[in-house]
Amino acid sequence: MLSSQGHRTFKISEIRIESPRVKRIVVEGRIGAKPGQYVMIWVPKIGEIPISIARERNNETWFLISKVGKVSSAIHSLSEGDKLWIRGPYGNGFSLNVRGKVALIGGGYGIAPLIFLAENLKSRDVKIRFYAGFREKEEVLMEDLLRELSDELILSTNDGSHGLRGLITEHVDFDWPDHIYTAGPERMLVNVVRRGVQRGKDVEASLERLIRCAVGLCGACSLDPLGLLVCKDGPVFKGKILVNTRDFGNYKRSFDGRKIPPEVHY
Ligand SMILES: Cc1cc2nc3c(=O)[nH]c(=O)nc-3n(C[C@H](O)[C@H](O)[C@H](O)COP(=O)(O)OP(=O)(O)OC[C@H]3O[C@@H](n4cnc5c(N)ncnc54)[C@H](O)[C@@H]3O)c2cc1C
Ligand code: FES
């Protein structure tokens, strides 16, 4: 069924608890996306949020959804057989025409778009090293799948309860890769982008900002000073562009347009 805003309905075929905060939600049917793109998921009477596509295969699409506030909690309360209202895909996605050594660096649910990317790159002439960082052992997501999709998996937890100890960025060998793709908390993105760009590496990062219309009309997701729109020109940006935006690592816009620190919730 199609809503007036172009949402399609998808039946939830599987729900898996991946960690205390994150559920894997699988729907029947494909979105027709490329890795790095996202959809808008609408829960009637509650609201609508942007979510990355974590996987598309056979006739199903996967999402990894962290329970944060009202809309994500409403999605967490759904059951298998229920419907999701989805519009999209939106955004540009990652570059796929690469060769050589590729480092994927993800934190928390930021691994979602990188899973989709790894699966796509696997069939190309590349060597994939997947770096995945989590706060603690019980928050580790999809370790078996990450191992399956990469030539090498390097996993860390902040407290050392699983894998290496410390932030994942402490374990990245920035001299190794030809290409770096990253998604996750903005502090991590800033570290990866700065160090990668300093070494002259080709870096792409997926950025999170307030997404409302998702089609470039409302301006909610605009980046200073170039006016790039995260919803349409992103969410994936070249590192060389991000280091020249004022917002990156410094602030994001809240619902009323105020500047707030990137790590503060809206
Ligand atoms: C391109 C993109 C991809 C994302 N992919 C994922 C993913 O794969 N898995 C996942 O768990 N989360 C993802 N997020 C973050 C997710 O959109 C927020 O956690 C979610 O919007 C929180 O909404 P809420 O209603 O549960 O929380 P509330 O605190 O109730 O949020 C209220 C409203 O604020 C807005 N909002 C809040 N946080 C964010 C945020 N970080 N980004 C954008 N809008 C926000 C939404 O409009 C939301 O309805 C992504 C964000 C972006 C921009
Ligand atoms: S969300 Fe409306 S312009 Fe980007």
Image: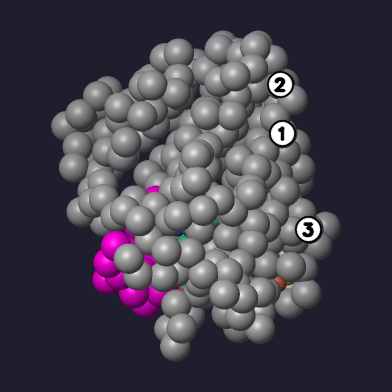
Q: Quadrant of the N terminus?
A: bottom right
For residue 200, side relative to residue 183 (left or right): right
34 sits to left or right of 117: right
Residue 148 image position (x, y, % from top left): 38, 21
CB within 8 Å, label 3 to label 2: no
Question: For mark 2, what is the residue?
Answer: 98
Amino acid at dot 2: Val
Q: Element at badge 1?
A: loop
Mark 3 or mark 1: which is in front?
Answer: 1
Q: CA distance from mark 3 to mark 2?
A: 24 Å
Q: Position of residue 216 (x, y in %)?
A: 77, 68
Quarter holding residue 94: top right
Looking at the image, is 5 positioned above or below residue 150? below
How many residues crowd around disc 1 within 10 Å: few (fewer than 14), some, or many (20 or more)? some
Q: Which residues lie in the magenta part? A: 63-80
| Label 3 environment density (alpha carbons within 10 Å; few <14, some 14–19, many ≥20) | some
Q: Which residue is mark 3?
A: 228
